Amino acid sequence: MSRTMTSSKYSESDSDAPRATRHAPPDTRHASRDTRHASLVTLDIPDVLNYQLVYRLETTTPFAVAPRDDARFVFCGCLGDGMRCFTSLRNGFGTAGAIKTLAKLATPTRMLYLFVSPAGELLHYGWVRVGRCRQFWINPGEVFIGPIRTVPAGRGKGLATDGIKLGINALLARGFTVFYGNSQRDNLASQRVLEKSGFGLPVSAYLKSPRAE
């Protein structure tokens, strides 16, 4: 078995082309970009390769998300925001983990969003990094969302999908319009979350270390 994926290829003369991944707009109303220099490329990726899928969304349109009674959304865009929800961070990450989280939020490139139960327990979280991704190239001012995690008590409630949508809404309010996510090749649940969150189908992939025999 192999996975067939369609992406786009920029002309070599296009000075605005990204330096690593090559993108096509996801099949979603939230996608918008200039495709005058793009042509379709189909990639056949053998399943024997250990690869990650890359998702991309460009939008200026906020998502409509229904209010929830079972969880409260919190966006931590700076250290002060994190300090105001320190109890929930400590409940989810432990004291040392909560302090480490605050240290990350003190940097200009890291943000975090949460879903917290009415009792203050951490149910779901997603990290945000601006202008940098460890796995693949993104441009300055673009945003990588991940990792995202849902604790067992919060699973099956759609928190991951709502969290990405509300996180993107908060980032749109801060002027960001280009977002990335990724998923392991065999993590179908993660892929469904990204597709339902407006990213549509994957636009690229990158290889990880060879799979162990």
Image (cartoon, rainbow, N blue to C red):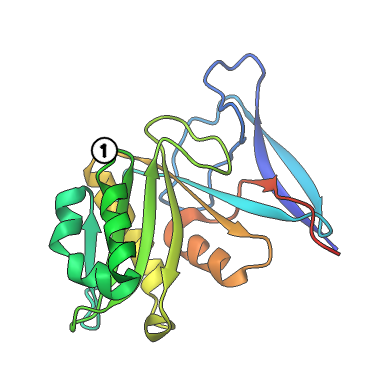
Residue 2 sits in quarter = bottom right
Residue 178: x and y in percent read 41, 40
Counting from the top left corner in percent of width and height, residue 150 is at: 41, 74
Residue, x 45% and y 55% (percent of image)? 146
Regarding mark 1 in the picture, which secondary structure is present there?
Answer: loop
Name the quarter where the C terminus is drawn: bottom right
Question: Which residue lies at the image location 20% right of the left edge and 82% below the top edge?
Answer: 69
Question: Toward the viewer: 57 or 123?
Answer: 123
User: Dividing the image into 4 quarters, which one contains the N terminus?
Assistant: bottom right
The quadrant in which residue 89 appears is bottom left
Look at label 1 and name its amino acid.
Gly
Locate residue 11: give its quadrant. Answer: top right
Q: Give the vertical position of 209 relative to 18 (above or below).
A: below
Residue 121 lies left or right of residue 146; in this view the side is: left
Above or below, 119 relative to 170: below
Say left or right for 50 vs 79. right
Residue at (53%, 56%) from the top-left corner?
Answer: 200
Question: Residue 187's spot in the image, x, y percent?
Answer: 62, 68
Residue 64 in view here = no
Q: Is residue 13 above or below residue 211?
A: above
Provide the residue designation for mark 1. Answer: 175
Residue 8 location in percent, x, y?
A: 65, 36
For residue 212, say whether it is visible.
yes
Identify the residue shown where x is 57% and y is 64%: 191
In the rendered view, tell whether residue 53 sits above or below residue 72: above
